[in-house]
Amino acid sequence: MTARVAVLVFPGTNSEEETRDLLLDCGADARIVHWSESASLAYYDAFVLPGGFAYEDRIRAGAIAAHDAMLDVVIEAAQAGKLVMGICNGAQILLEAGLVPGSGEIRRPTAAFTHNAQGHFICERVLLRRTVAAERCAIAAALPEDALIPAWAAHGQGRLAASAAHLEEIERGGHVVFRYADARGATDAHLAPQGSALGAAALTNREGNVLAIMPHPERDAWNFNHLDRREGADVLAPSGGSVLFRSFVTALERW
Amino acid sequence: MRDLAVAELDDETLRARADALGLALRVDELRGIADRLGRAPSLVELYAFDAQWSEHCSYKSSRALLSHLPTKGADVVLGPAEDAGILHLGEHEGERYGIVIAHESHNHPSQVVPFEGAATGIGGIVRDVLCMGAEVVAVADPLRFGNVDPARPHQRAVARGVVDGIAAYGNAIGVPNLAGDCYFDPEFDDNVLVNVVALGLVKESQIIHSRVPKHGADFVLLLVGKATDASGFGGASFSSVALDARETESNKGAVQVPDPFLKNVIMRASYRVFSMLRARGIEVGFKDLGAGGIMGCSAELCSAGGFGAELDLDTVNVAVDHLLPEVIAVGETQERLLWALPEEIVDEVERIYNEEFSLPQVAQNARAVRIGRATAAQRYQLRHRGELVMDVPIDFLTGTVRDTLPAQPPAPPRERREHDLACERTLDDVLHATLAHRDVCSRAPLFRHYDAVVRGRTVIPRGEADAGVLAPIRGSQLAFALSVDGNPRIGRIDPERAAEHAVYEAVRNVVAVGAEPIGLTDCLNYGSPRDARQFGELVAGIDGLARSARALGLAYVSGNVSLYNAASDGHAIPASPIVACLGRLTDVSQCVTLALKEVGSRLYLVGETQRALGGSVLAALLSLRDEGVPAIDFERVLAEHRFLLAAARAGLLRSAHDISDGGLLVTLAEMSFACYPAQRAAIGIELDGLAGWSNVGRYESLFGEWGGIVVEVAERDVDRFEELAGALESVREIGTTIPQPILAFDDDAWEIDDLHRSWSRPLQELFP
């Protein structure tokens, strides 16, 4: 049986459709589930938290959604080893929920994606490179080695911030799955367009079944999103950033 | 009932009383209302007529002129009659799809409270598109700011506030910002222009109209959205008078408060309602609450269907108690829409908004609530606390009002040069100054605030081609292109030609990405209609818009008129007709970006150089008193565009970029910048000597803004390209792409790197 993926919608979420569409195109059985339908969540095998402004980013981005009833289910699932991926606002929610990097208690975050260094929203093309071993994070495990993943940074709060001790723990524990890279694959911290600590674009938890990724690979994920570097003739086919979603689906199949 | 005893007051006293009430209605209009009603009008009635008969709602001085614009065509699904127009995009899986397009201004609110004014501009235009039954897929924003030099803190704060407001709203609702332009001119110091365009996708069989359907007597009026408060009272009238700095504070009450978070949820809930209605095949009416609030929306929704209306203001969900009935009736609280629904589905629609999407939990007392009915009787009636506070013939309220005003045609341009420009500044100096000019330099520091790619269907984001391109339908290769244009430097010296250039540039930009232009919208930003000279500029502008659209075989499907754009000293803004052009791509893979693609390509100019420099950046830099604006030969332009579209379809265009602000060298430099310093290797350009491609002088050829498009053709495609061009004379080879990162011309060669520095930085200090 194909694993079932729930794409969660909180009040203020805005990227649910493209996230669901890309999961479908990569072979997953994905459905959008609304906040008023949280009772149905128990039937799903994996969860994706898409981008947006859940609960209007009140207090901090993701802070209120981390206390939504849907997160009760997600937290339980993550602790049971199910795959959970949060993109952009979804990533912020996973950090606020304490699932990632997961060094503290649940809903007592030890790190946050917070206000960009420039103090405002930015929308830019970025490249990401995996900087941990394949087996470190199940969701990113099936990516081609040294792949540069195109994505869009589109956020006002995408700068990783934590105490020096927690940052060291994040670095040492191999939590930084993706870093911002240049076209040659170099990953220097200054390449993070919003000043993210460690040049981090994505973090995982200790167990590697939860991924919190700030940039949007799903917005540069079909040939029509990047006609100048399309792969093959079919303009509607997934390509580019879709490799991460394929890896997620591969992990689901193995799971 | 509180009323105004109009018949008992002399003109002077009546004027004073009306002013004290904040009514912009004229004395003769006040007397006309009292005569028609046969009694003293209530205050609620007066505020209702004040909104409904304002220039903003009634177009009373411009309506007759707007009838000159072409509005019909093969691709027009719905012309300018409702909240938005609709153009035919194409067919997919047996369904015809339309693109809903609306275009408005939010100039005065943005001047007074920039963040909220600009944000509610986006909010309002998005509702205009949503209420047609469409999914909102893109927004765009043409902006005109004042002089934003470092010593001008107020003008800088306004510019930043506007950009932040657009970003905050558009990003949160999750609609990509696809296009826009931006100019800076001291004549906008006291009156910025903030225009907004929104696009939606709709199946043509499932359009919802802004009227109660034919069989709709007794249809329920269901108000949806934010709880009504005291914000935005008098908005329509406020937009219809010139701004006075001393009154800025008192005007702030007229500005609305945005809530994009609530709007995000209302949009998604409305999409759910759309699919429920489609499944059940029920015809309904749906309309945005804009100017005139509940009153304006309900009156127009019902009268457009041939009905009257009765509403009970006590049923309206309010944010605060004890609101006056006129505030509930005509206040412009944001994030509200009005449905006209048959009784049998009202409960289900209420359930979707209030329970499934839990509006009351999303914002304080937000909800869907019944507030009245459409009636066969042709009256418009409002009750409040059991009292009938408004009872007027509905056609009197919503009918046409007209002012016939005198217009003085603009003076013909005074100075034209007969000879080529003799310029004392070096090419190098002029090129760097042009690239660094605020109307030319990179817009990235501004538009990077906006989400260009949410929804994942963006094909070409802003900055990568002359028009934004988006493929709105999952599983389909259909795509549309959008560009918005209007040059205030031309508007200042030649209002009629400014309109023609706005059309030409918007259409040219769409063609440059390989899309077929299918329709236009216009937003007419002018001064006071009560000043014959300023009104004459509007008359000339509409003539220019009409003539150029007819020549190109295009129609206007939506638009807006924004008058009284002037400072308190009466000095009007430059004539600012702003035009949006929508283009269609049946195969998205044929679209063309502006980045050079390979070394060894030939560059062609499609267009004719001209001597005229009027309205150019060069003229501004050199303070030239040249008022000759380049003429447009639309017959030739049409032939050029047909040829370019054929070449794009045949895959012969590797890149393309139009010639506009700053002229040809800027165009070439930007084509090189676009592949640099990004991931590709730099590609430079060697431009041929003038003799081969121009009949006019160096400066006119390199910096003139005569239009045209530069295209890159790969060496292997040159024969096919030239064969396709056939007898078209205005296609000339002007240069080649080279591996060195330089722009070379005659004895000059500029490092692309140096040029890029001049071009990329100027707006960074304003929008860090």
Image (cartoon, coloured by chain):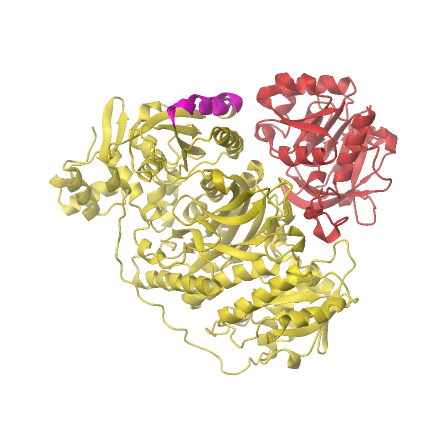
Chain colours: A red, B yellow
- Is residue A108 rendered to the left or right of residue B46? right
Which quadrant of the view contains residue B498? Answer: bottom left
Relative to B142, say whether B222 is above or below: above
Relative to B650, say whether B724 is above or below: below
Residue B637, x across and y down, in percent? 53, 68
Q: Which is more toward the observer, B669 or B155?
A: B669
**Residue farthest to the bottom?**
B419
Residue B365 visible in rendering: no
Relative to B628, say whether B63 is above or below: above
Is residue B369 found inside the magenta-colored segment of the image?
Answer: no
Q: Quadrant of the N terminus of chain B?
A: top left
Residue B108, x across and y down, in percent? 41, 48
**Residue farthest to the left?**
B8
Q: Residue at x 44, y 77 (%)?
A: B415
Residue B301, x across and y down, in percent? 35, 37
Residue B558, x across and y down, in percent? 43, 50
Residue B693 visible in rendering: yes
Region in magenta: B342-361
Q: Residue at x 69, y 28 (%)?
A: A30
- Is residue B103 rendered to the left or right of residue B765? left
